[in-house]
Amino acid sequence: MKELRGLSHLFVCSFLFAFSNRMVLPAMTDITLEAVCPGNDHCSLAIYLSGFQQAIVGLGALVVTPLVGNLSDKFGRKALLCIPVTVVIPPAVILAYSRSTVYFYAAYVIQIFAGMFCEGSVDSLSLAYMADKVDERRRASVFGAFTGICTAGVVSGILAARFLPTSSIFQVSAVFKVITAIYLRAFLPESGNGIAISDEEINSPFCSPSTDTEPSPNLPVFRKIPSISDMTNLLTSSSTMSKAAIITFFSGIGESGLSTALLYYLKVQFHFSKNQFADLLLTSNAAATISQLTLMPFLAPRLGEEKLLIIGLLGCCGYVPYFSASLVVLTVFIYPSIRSIVSRKAGSTEQGLAQGCITGISLFASMVAPIAFTPLTALFLSDEAPFEFKGFSILCAGFATNY
């Protein structure tokens, strides 16, 4: 009962965090354009600023996320979860107060540093927390339910943004971010693993016994800050970990490339407003929520993570920019399936590090994507495009996902 209570509190925190973070997304394109290029629907500077932020956040999070995960293995999940849910509050408060050019740039700079601690850390620490609580046979279902609850928070946030005026969106977001931090601190119990690791535990094998045919890798337990070579050794210590890293990278490239290009393309080509952005995001995320909360728990015990991962990848292969919303019911299987497979390969005191490394790969992909897709998007949305194809960067994102 205590374990279930801990998971329920974690799900509440995750829902509130996703709700408060994503409700500002439909308004950010208009806010950025108004602050940087008032009165213009197209502004290359706004596109480059968004891409630069995504790249720098991805680079910083690539280093920070495995470190935070490693520290959570020793000092506890809750203590480290408090960091990302707290650092996202200041930029939200700034934009709640004013969205003029000066305040926008102030929030922009702070958001970059906050994103390094926040982007990926909440997910990887939450997954490690659940791995501490849940038997490995049920992790795929629980991970899927967790992803569905986070997506439900996204849907609720976007739905709220659909009906709230722009001036109120950031105020409501700031209030709920404060509530999330208070709730987590007050109600979430510690997971019970990863605290005060003894010498006996440190000298024990990395992985618990597994029923897989492939032997579990004997991955190192780090007493120090993990280096790039440490993380590389971890990810190449078994074919399963290597394959998980490769799949995570290329699916992250496609997803991040699409998010980099799509909103500005819709703004320029179809003059989308906040409400239309909200409708689009609401549709795709609602489909993802239904799939994760109903199909994933039903199929995971029957098919297993590997087959669900294949189904999700096949959904990506059918990617077409305007048809992709219907395929999201399949592609959402990728994330929890990979995480569950990686979780089975990690020992009970190494869940944070293992999940943090896979998250780092995903964030590295989100750093690479805007470097490639931001100039491409800006070029084909401008008058200097080599040929008329405003959605060319979206097509390229689809090819990256299919790879």
Image (cartoon, helix red, strand yellow):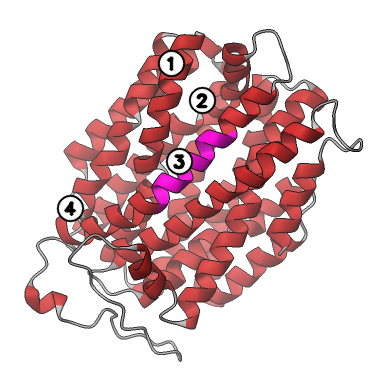
Residue 382 drawn above or below residue 288: above
**Marked residue nearer the N-terminal end (1 or 2):** 2
Residue at (64, 58) in percent of width and height: 331
Report the amino acid beneath label 2.
Val
The spot of residue 72 in percent (x, y) is: 23, 56
Tell which tag, 3 or 1, sits nearer the viewer.
3
User: Is label 3 in contact with label 1 (beta carbons under 8 Å)?
Assistant: no
The spot of residue 320 in percent (x, y) is: 80, 51
Q: Residue 190 carries which label?
A: 4
**Marked residue nearer the N-terminal end (4 or 3):** 3
Residue at (37, 85) in percent of width and height: 216
Q: How far apart are marks 1 and 2 (CA)?
A: 10 Å
Which residue is labeled 2 in the image?
24
Tell which tag, 1 or 4, sits nearer the viewer.
1
**Marked residue nearer the N-terminal end (3 or 1):** 3
Magenta stretch: residue 309 in it? no
Q: How far apart are marks 2 and 3 (CA)?
A: 18 Å
Tell which tag, 2 or 4, sits nearer the viewer.
2
Q: Residues within 10 Å of mark 1 (few under 14, many from 20)?
A: many
User: Is label 1 in contact with label 4 (beta carbons under 8 Å)?
Assistant: no
Q: How crowded is mark 3: few (under 14 residues within 10 Å), some or many (20 or more)?
A: many
The spot of residue 13 in percent (x, y) is: 33, 40
Q: Residue 57 carries which label?
A: 3
The spot of residue 96 in percent (x, y) is: 41, 14
Tell which tag, 2 or 3, sits nearer the viewer.
3
| Nearer to us in this view, 289 or 242 | 242
User: Is label 2 in contact with label 4 (beta carbons under 8 Å)?
Assistant: no
